[in-house]
Amino acid sequence: MTHSAKTLIREIWESFQRLPLWVRLWVALWLVPINLLSVAFLSSPNGLLIALLAVGGMAPNVVLMWIERGFSSLMALPHLLIWPASIVVAINTALTHPDHSGFAFYLWVLAATNLVSILFDVPDFIRWLKGKREVA
């Protein structure tokens, strides 16, 4: 690993560490794992679409972290653009395939998780639009 790559990773890690503890716990122990778990259900009804939306709401943030060298309020934007669709698809799939009980339960958890995230993301993105562009 090059010196610049190590520096970038260190800067992103330090930015993450500057986030409030509850945010770090929410992101690392719940938000990311719940969305990544979607890949375990690829063969389930709408599984590929659900995984694409779940992971697709997070993946652009890797690029944003790299560009900004840390965590910023702009990271709310991919969630706001993609996760409303993930919520609709998850709920619709859970309602139309209740016989897949473990999967249906997961879909309700995923929908609730991403809805809570969006509720956090709206004020974050508004702050970014108003000029709060620094990284944590």
Image (cartoon, grey):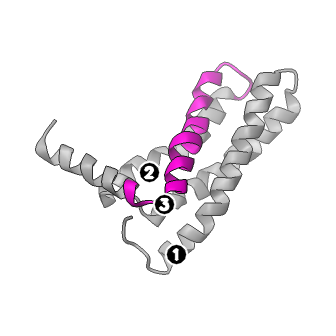
Q: Mark 3 and mark 2: span between their CA atoms?
A: 18 Å
Residue 15, horizontal then vertical, whole percent? 35, 58
Amino acid marked by disc 1: Arg
Q: Is disc 3 placed on a helix, strand or loop? A: loop
Residue at image coords 68%, 54%? 116
Give the residue number, with chain letter if any, for mark 2. 61
The quarter in which the N terminus is drawn is top left
Dot 3 crowding, Cα within 10 Å, few <14, some 14–19, many 20+: few
Please determine whether, in this image, residue 58 is positioned above or below residue 41. below
Give the residue number, with chain letter if any, for mark 3. 20
The residue segment tinted magenta is 17-46
Look at discs 3 and 2 and give the one toward the viewer.
3
Q: How many marks?
A: 3
Residue at image coords 74%, 47%? 112
Amino acid marked by disc 2: Asn
Give the residue number, with chain letter if any, for mark 1. 127
Amino acid marked by disc 3: Pro
